[in-house]
């Protein structure tokens, strides 16, 4: 899949946080590497009354805030700014659509231009925007639409969003972003598993005791309380990012890596997840909400204070146990947890192998711990394999746990591109491999929905946990009752 010669990249929600903090810095950094099509234009659409000059000034300021100064080059900044246009558009008002259409038409080689429409707005607007784009004649077979999550808030609403967008764009033209799939370490999971032979024979229920997937954040909800309170950690993180990580850990090797095969294999994992009956939800899920506490030695407010009101029952933390019910994974627990305002920002996948079947070093000092593979998704991207070795020296066996470390920073010594850099390039090239297909999104909702339903029925609110902690004690108990513990993050 080649980069097209010409592209118009239109962002609905062009003055929003995502556009300014993530999308434009990512486009800048790719422009820095000369990877944008030569006459690529970036058209920001929003309700704001900006003209091009004012919008460019806003983007310049935001690049200064969000791009590492070492990567800021004035000539590249100027080039990127010269690509930018702003269209003020009130969705109800035909005038704005007319302006947008005029701008899209106003370029050489209109027919050859790949038009990308990035929907960085509330999902309730997705269908309407697509319908309007079709009305003004701006959708042709090579046009693409990119949808940010959340795609719905349950299965029915996700289906409705998919239906409304699907009336205008074919599935091959629809790119549903899960930015975790653009992270280097997440893509490396596929390569580590399938471009090597040493893991695959062990990667099953005969050798794996259990899997832990943690996405811990130290930040609170900040100024996103409005959205977050209607979502919560299960919708915001588990239904998408954590389940995608689980899929990449658990999936079968695809015949080769292409746009459908990887997604076919991930879908099979989602469909094999153990259904969450009310009894299982009560037994195998824990939800929490952060109280005031301390993060990095600084006092931080509670969720209710961040939100500006009491009485919310939204969870900011989830821990749960699930299983992939297939031949490879039968009986292997997958423990997932994620939370805001935890003691650190760290995302990690830990595959814990079974212990040796027999203790053959009688009188040995020290312990034989289970082998573990830690895949550090972020920060400090890398992998560590924990082994037991003999401490050097005479006089019997002293056993010691050590780790073989692969640090991306040390091994590759270069900046790792942000997930959006990779994903935006893939959209322009028309490569959907790292995007979620409609059936995946809906299968993930079908699994998550019974959890949400059961929690809604429950009179018990989420458990408090102090900001700056590892979550509620019940999350530890979830593993302890199975004779296991959460692995120390980054340890
Ligand atoms: C987003 C969630 O999808 O992912 C946020 O909506 C969360 O709540 C973010 O903070 C985490 O992404 P990252 O890349 O910082 O781990």
Image (cartoon, rainbow, N blue to C red):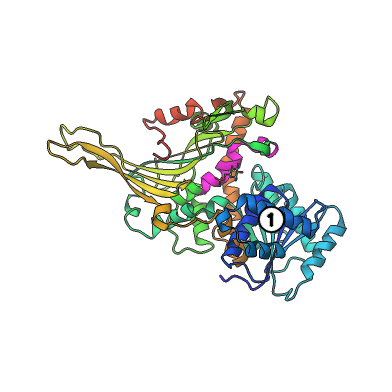
Which quadrant: the C terminus? top left
Q: Is residue 119 visible?
A: no
Q: Main secondary structure of the magenta part?
A: helix
Magenta stretch: give its range: 226-244
Q: Position of residue 285 (x, y in %)?
A: 51, 32
Q: Is residue 378 visible?
A: yes
Q: Residue 401 vs residue 278: left or right?
A: left
Q: Is residue 221 left or right of residue 482?
A: right
How many numbered discs? 1
Residue 299 vertical position relative to residue 409 in the rendered view, above or below:
above
Label 1 sits on a secondary structure element that is helix
Q: Quadrant of ligand 1?
A: top right
From the viewer's side, name the closer residue of 50 and 188. 50
Residue 123 versus residue 417 in the image, above or below: above
Q: Position of residue 481 (x, y in %)?
A: 40, 28
Q: Which residue is mark 1?
A: 60
* Residue lying furthest bottom: 109
473 lies above or below 157: above
- Inspect the magenta stretch and tell me whether residue 236 lies in it: yes
Kindly identify the residue that appears in the image at 54 percent across and 63 percent down. 259
Residue 304, image x, y percentages: 65, 27
- Say few, some or many: other residues with alpha carbon within 10 Å of mark 1 (under 14 / 14 to 19 / 20 or more): some
Please state which of residues 2 and 64 is positioned toward the viewer in this rendering. 64
Say whether residue 450 is magenta: no
């Amino acid at each position: 899949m080649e980069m097209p010669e010409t592209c118009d990249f239109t962002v609905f929600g062009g003055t929003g946080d995502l556009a300014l903090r993530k999308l434009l810095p990512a486009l800048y950094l790719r422009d820095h590497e000369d990877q944008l099509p030569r006459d690529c234009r970036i058209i920001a659409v929003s309700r704001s009354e900006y003209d091009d000059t004012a919008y460019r000034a806003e983007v310049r300021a935001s690049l200064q805030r969000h791009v590492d100064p070492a990567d800021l080059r004035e000539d590249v900044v100027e080039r990127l700014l010269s690509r930018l246009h702003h269209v003020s558009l009130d969705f109800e008002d035909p005038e704005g659509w007319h302006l947008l259409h005029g701008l899209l038409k106003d370029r050489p080689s209109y027919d050859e231009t790949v038009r990308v429409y990035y929907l960085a707005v509330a999902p309730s607007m997705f269908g309407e925007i697509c319908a309007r784009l079709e009305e003004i004649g701006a959708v042709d077979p090579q046009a693409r639409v990119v949808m940010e999550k959340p795609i719905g808030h349950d299965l029915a609403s996700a289906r409705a969003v998919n239906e409304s967008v699907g009336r205008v764009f074919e599935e091959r033209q629809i790119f549903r972003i899960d930015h975790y799939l653009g992270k280097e370490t997440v893509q490396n999971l596929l390569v580590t598993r399938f471009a090597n032979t040493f893991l695959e024979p062990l990667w099953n229920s005969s050798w794996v005791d259990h899997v832990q997937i943690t996405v811990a954040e130290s930040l609170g909800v900040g100024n996103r309380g409005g959205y977050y309170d209607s979502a919560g950690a299960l919708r915001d993180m588990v239904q998408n990012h954590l389940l995608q990580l689980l899929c990449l850990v658990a999936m079968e090797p695809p015949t080769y890596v292409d746009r459908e095969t990887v997604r076919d294999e991930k879908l099979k994992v989602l469909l094999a997840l153990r259904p969450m009956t009310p009894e299982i939800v009560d037994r195998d899920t824990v939800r929490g909400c952060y109280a005031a506490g301390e993060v990095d030695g600084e006092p931080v407010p509670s969720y209710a204070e961040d939100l500006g009101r009491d009485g919310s029952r939204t969870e900011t933390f989830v821990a749960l146990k699930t299983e992939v019910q297939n031949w490879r994974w039968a009986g292997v627990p997958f423990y997932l947890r994620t939370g805001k305002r935890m003691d650190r920002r760290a995302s990690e996948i830990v595959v814990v192998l079974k212990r040796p079947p027999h203790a053959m070093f009688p009188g040995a000092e020290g312990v034989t711990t289970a082998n573990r593979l830690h895949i550090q998704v972020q920060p400090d991207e890398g992998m560590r394999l924990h082994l037991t070795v003999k401490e050097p020296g005479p006089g019997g066996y002293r056993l010691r746990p050590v780790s073989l470390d692969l640090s991306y920073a040390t091994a590759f010594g270069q900046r790792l591109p942000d997930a959006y850099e990779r994903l935006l390039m893939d959209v322009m090239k028309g490569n959907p491999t790292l995007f979620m297909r409609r059936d995946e999104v809906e299968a993930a909702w079908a699994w998550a929905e019974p959890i949400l339903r059961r929690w809604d029925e429950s009179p018990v609110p989420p458990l408090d946990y102090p900001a700056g902690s590892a979550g509620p004690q019940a999350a530890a108990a979830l593993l302890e009752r199975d004779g296991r513990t959460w692995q120390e993050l980054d340890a």
